[in-house]
Image (spheres, rainbow, N blue to C red):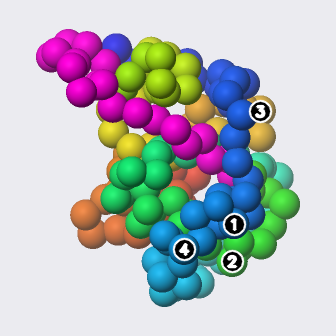
Amino acid sequence: MNSIKYLKWSDLISPTMSPDEYLKIYRKKINKVYESYDPKSEILEEIKLFLKNKQEKLKIIVLGAEWCPDCSRNVPRMIKLVKVINTKDIELKILYGIMKNALYKPGETIWHKQRSPPEATDPKFELKAIPTFYFFNKNGEYIGVIVENPKLTSTLEEDILEILEKKI
């Protein structure tokens, strides 16, 4: 496949939620995770300085769903770290509504084509699991992805910094 490297920010065509809209809608379900997450401030500062020094902007799209346990854990964490960084150099959009196709067969997409946003089955997105966080530079060019969870010995903010350092 490997079409993800051709993914662009502009390929997102469905309506999205802002972090504040997400928090308002899902507050009861995710509040404990959101409030208890304590991102590593030194890593957040590195991200902020990196973007400032490179005169870069980080754009993030997350695809997920209300029914997904990993989404209920990691989307609030991503929102929290973006809010704590508190810079205009990061933009986060949230696309929810991904539905599984219970009748899918191997080789087919596991996402329901009619009930999910079109991005779920668009080959450019290569969506294999949710949440999936897609990262883009200021020009809307794809620079990296986090699928479901950060790496085993890492945090979301450490993975973001690694993506920035490798691709920008």
Report the amino acid beneath label 1: Lys
The residue closer to the viewer here, 91 or 54, is 91
Of the two numbered discs 3 and 1 on the same chain, state the one appearing first in sequence: 1
Q: Position of residue 130 (x, y in %)?
A: 39, 44
Residue receiving disc 4: 28
Dot 1 falls on a residue whose secondary structure is helix
Confirm or deny contact between disc 2 and disc 1 (CB under 8 A).
Answer: no
- Magenta stretch, residue numbers: 92-110
Of the two numbered discs 2 and 1 on the same chain, state the one appearing first in sequence: 1
Confirm or deny contact between disc 2 and disc 3 (CB under 8 A).
Answer: no
Mark 2 vs mark 4, foreground winner is 4
- Res 93 seen here: yes
Quarter location, residue 105: top left
Residue at mark 2 to residue at mark 1: CA–CA distance: 18 Å
Confirm or deny contact between disc 4 and disc 3 (CB under 8 A).
Answer: no
Q: Residue at x 84, y 60 (%)?
A: 88
Q: Residue at x 70, y 48 (%)?
A: 17
Residue receiving disc 2: 84
The residue closer to the viewer here, 70 or 148, is 70
Quadrant for the N terminus in the image: top left
Residue receiving disc 3: 139
Mark 2 vs mark 1, foreground winner is 1
Most common SS among magenta residues: loop
Report the amino acid beneath label 3: Asn
Mark 2 vs mark 3, foreground winner is 2
Of the two numbered discs 4 and 3 on the same chain, state the one appearing first in sequence: 4
Above or below — where is 6 with respect to 84?
Answer: above
